[in-house]
């Protein structure tokens, strides 16, 4: 957990600032996970790691009160971007500060690749879920262009480096089953981050990933070298992908 905390204490503010450039750039990525969670209005939800509250923001319209969403984030600096309307915990993921069988859903978006011991987090997710609860995680699959970009250009152009511990095919399924989950499913989903212009795409990625050692031309070159970027209907589309994993805690 120390590596995650160190990274986002240093560049969590840059990550949060990207949402100001284009708040819906990653909307499809978030929507896939939210749809898999199958949220109902009365549900209590844990978002971990919550980052700056991006997943929580997408979940808010689906529940009666924002306090039903508990954002657990290890990095104090990153957590500063979370809306105070949510329940906020600055705490490690291997010791979730939630009671046994206290939530209906646990969601985790794009933070697992910073965890060396993913199995402990999966077990914690199982512990805090009520019987009948659902856990959904979306994260980077090893061997994909996304993984190569993160451990390549992002590693090169950030002050913290990037040494992602990406999921191998079948790994999240095994982790879910080992933690006690049933009806386990794993699917690699490809989609696009969408922007209004190439300039917006560059500024967004530079901020999101904290690429402070690169100028905008270098960021553009890194993106076009890594991805088959296209323009359609006046929008710039950056191909992205995550592997989404679902597990149920049997009633």
Image: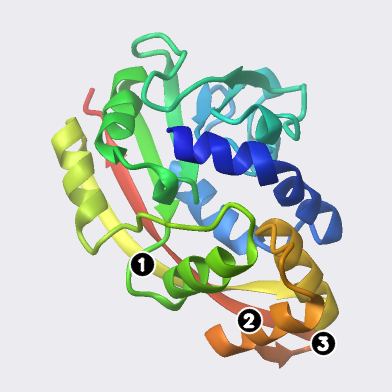
Query: Residue sitting at 67 percent across and 87 percent down?
Result: 221
Q: Which x, y percent locates residue 203?
A: 81, 69
Q: Which x, y percent locates residue 130?
A: 34, 19
Which residue lies under the disc numbered 2? 223
Local crowd at mark 1 within 10 Å, few (<14), some, or many (≥20)? Answer: some
Query: Residue sitting at 64 percent across and 29 percent down?
Result: 63
Looking at the image, is 243 positioned above or below residue 73? Answer: below
Secondary structure at badge 2 equals: helix
Quadrant position of the N terminus in the picture: top left
Which residue lies under the disc numbered 3? 234
Q: Front-most of 133 and 195?
A: 195
Q: How far apart are marks 1 and 2 (CA)?
A: 21 Å
Query: Residue sitting at 43 percent across and 57 percent down?
Result: 163
Q: Which x, y percent locates residue 109?
A: 50, 47
- Mark identifier at residue 188: 1
Q: Indicate the quadrant where residue 212 lies.
A: bottom right
């Amino acid at each position: 957990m120390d590596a995650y905390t160190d990274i986002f204490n240093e560049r969590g503010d840059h990550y949060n600032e990207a949402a100001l450039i284009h708040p819906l750039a990653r909307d499809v990525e978030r929507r896939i996970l939210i749809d898999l969670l199958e949220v109902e209005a009365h549900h209590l939800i844990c978002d971990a790691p919550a980052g700056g509250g991006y997943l929580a923001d997408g979940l808010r319209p689906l529940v009666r009160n924002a306090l039903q969403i508990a954002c657990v984030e290890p990095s104090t600096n990153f957590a500063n971007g979370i809306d105070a309307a949510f329940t906020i915990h600055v705490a490690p993921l291997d010791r979730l500060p939630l009671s046994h069988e206290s939530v209906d859903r646990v969601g985790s978006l794009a933070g697992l690749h910073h965890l060396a011991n993913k199995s402990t987090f999966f077990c914690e997710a199982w512990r805090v879920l009520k019987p009948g609860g659902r856990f959904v995680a979306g994260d980077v699959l090893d061997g994909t262009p996304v993984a190569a970009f993160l451990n390549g250009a992002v590693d090169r152009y950030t002050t913290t480096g990037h040494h992602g511990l990406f999921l191998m095919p079948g790994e999240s399924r095994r982790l879910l089953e080992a933690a006690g989950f049933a009806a386990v499913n794993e699917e690699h989903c490809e989609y696009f981050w969408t922007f209004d212009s190439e300039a917006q795409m560059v500024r967004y990625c530079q901020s999101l990933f904290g690429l402070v050692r690169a100028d905008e031309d270098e960021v553009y070159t890194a993106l076009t070298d890594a991805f088959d970027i296209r323009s359609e209907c006046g929008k710039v589309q950056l191909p992205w992908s995550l592997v989404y994993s679902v597990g149920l805690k049997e009633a």
